[in-house]
Image: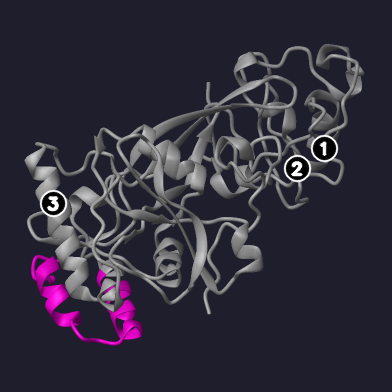
Amino acid sequence: MNTKIADFSLIPPDELFKPKKKSISEIKPEKTISNISKNDNFIQKNLSVSKNSISNISIIDSQINLKPLSLKGLGDTLKNQIPSIASNIKIANVFSNKTNSTFLNLPPRNANALTGSQFIENTKGLPRDQREKMILNEVLTGNVPDFARNFKEITLSSTDSLGQNHTGKIKILPDYVSIGSNDNFIRIPMDPMTAQKIANKTGTMLPTKKLVNDIYKNSTVKLTPQPLPAGSTMMSSEYYQKHNAMVENQRISKGYNLGEITSGHQKDLVITNLLDSNPKKVAIYGWHQQNGKAIQPLSTIHEDTYADYSHGVRLINQKMTLDGKEVNVADVLNNPELAKMLSDEGVIKNTKIRIR
């Protein structure tokens, strides 16, 4: 049966984890419920109500069946019947009736919109800030090819401090953000501020370094990096076009289709704790070789207005499923017990790029 709960929040408590000798089954009855469903043994054990304005909340489970209650009555019921593990994790929006969208939240592409080649021609020689504005406008008005809109799902796993195994499913775009049609497009590099503006409007976010690795492992198309000579032209629209053509030639020659999870052709813009002390920088990582090793280590060397031909923006859905329940990716990244599923840096509190 479906289990429904109103808004909850995943906020790591002040004292996150205190080891206890007693097993969960031995914890005092007033803090636990013995009839909890095994399928919900992690998430449901860590629910808590945070707002007194919520009413008519119902819990329906194979072994729990409570009639709708007022919040006043529910408070005592939850206190006595919903257990918590030592880590006391709280999950946000766990029982939302909304499911993750299959497609990137953008308007349909206008048949008269610019092709990738036309966009390149229109931006040649423009100052970087003007090109960024044009990138933002084209993407947000829906000038994105179909293959770059359809989310793909990858499965991840982790084990918490109590030895409980958790399974997560996260939705990612199969390729980097592109402008144009399926027949004529450009994978478009952009600075992190433009990327974040797009993410804000589409219900998405940038990946972590670990997610970039996980996406590569789950890619059905693993292309070989093709670096171009360094220099001032690296940031030009001409270079963007040249490199994209090289990527397409390689993809086509190997017989790969557009829309499959594809990696190895560009570096990723990422979120990282390094940006906490370097907020005016862009964080990049990846460009995996066929041996699985990334050419580009995690770096914040460039300013946040920088973008070159090798940079790509792969968006991930802000919502994911954790042990079958919908949660916020940001909440998982903010929780010490769960962050390891998505991050190899531990907790990442700042999941959005700073926009000036």
Question: Disc 2 to disc 1, how far (Cα)?
Answer: 8 Å
- Structural crowding at the residue carrying mark 2, measured as other residues with C-alpha within 10 Å and reported as few (<14), some (14–19) or many (≥20): some
Which residue was labeled with disc 2?
A: 49
> Which is more N-terminal, label 3 or label 2?
2
Question: Disc 3 to disc 1, how far (Cα)?
Answer: 58 Å
The disc at residue 156 is none
Identify the residue at horizontal 64%, vertical 36% (top origin). 338
Q: What stretch of residues is rendered in magenta?
A: 109-138
Residue 109 appears anywhere in the view = no
Identify the residue at horizontal 53%, vertical 56% (top origin). 271
Q: Are discs 2 and 1 less than 8 Å apart at CB?
A: yes
Identify the residue at horizontal 40%, vertical 33% (top origin). 154
Which residue was labeled with disc 3?
A: 248
Name the amino acid type tagged 1: Gly
**Quadrant location of residue 32?**
top right
Which residue was labeled with disc 1?
A: 75
Name the amino acid type tagged 2: Val
Question: Disc 2 to disc 3, how far (Cα)?
Answer: 51 Å
